[in-house]
Image (cartoon, grey):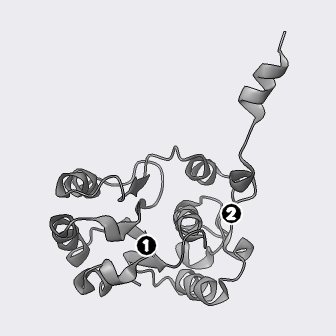
Amino acid sequence: MATGMDSLEHGYQVLARKYRPGRFSDLIGQDAMVRTLTNAFASGRLAHAFLLTGVRGVGKTTTARIIARALNCTNADNGDLESKIEPCGLCENCTAISNGSHVDVLEMDAASHTGVDDIRELIDGVRYLPTYGQYKVYIIDEVHMLSVNAFSALLKTLEEPPPRVKFIFATTEVRKIPVTVISRCQ
């Protein structure tokens, strides 16, 4: 027999997660960015690295997850990347990314993983093809917190990006990111 405590343990979800936008069209107040991203998806001209900037709480990480879902969604209209703009939110890839359990989408908080060894460990997986999705997506939150050596290690991969790999950087302080990294991002 289930108790009230069991239902709380299994049914509780933080409201911010429950109502977090899951599609580009759900993003409010980000019209220019949404237009740029949807045009990139529609034209099939996707950068290998995206840089999302803004104040805390504006939706950078949420947008990064939407991009990751759109890149890996299996319910495209006719199966090709150019026709796919909005992630469905229902396929196995979309739900796994939403739950944070997709093996091809890796999130790293650079505020607590600032060193070159952290970046090297992350970059070691870049050479492998995606397991389930079309792309391996590396989301690095608070990227401005990386050390100089970590940026140098990351730069080598950004200069010669492998196919089927996308980087999404989110930051509140873009001026702390080396220009050489910024110049390789959309």
Q: Position of residue 163 (x, y in %)?
A: 32, 68
Residue annotated with mark 2: 22
Q: Dividing the picture into quarters, in which one does residue 186 lie?
A: bottom left
Name the amino acid type tagged 2: Gly
Q: Crowdedness of circle 2 by 10 Å Cα count: few (<14), some, many (20+)?
A: many
Q: Is residue 152 left or right of residue 72?
A: left
Q: Is residue 24 left or right of residue 150?
A: right
The quarter of the image holding the N terminus is top right
Q: Dividing the picture into quarters, in which one does residue 123 lie?
A: bottom left
The residue depicted at 64 percent of the width and 66 percent of the height is: 76
Name the amino acid type tagged 1: Thr
Q: Position of residue 12 (x, y in %)?
A: 75, 37
In what element is the residue under mark 1?
A: strand
Q: Tell me if residue 167 comes above or below residue 122 in the rendering.
A: below
Residue 41 or residue 28, whichever sits in front = 28
The residue depicted at 60 percent of the width and 68 percent of the height is: 57
Residue annotated with mark 1: 171
* N-terminal-most mark, 2 or 1: 2
Residue 1 tag number? none
Q: Tell me if residue 4 comes above or below residue 20 in the rendering.
A: above
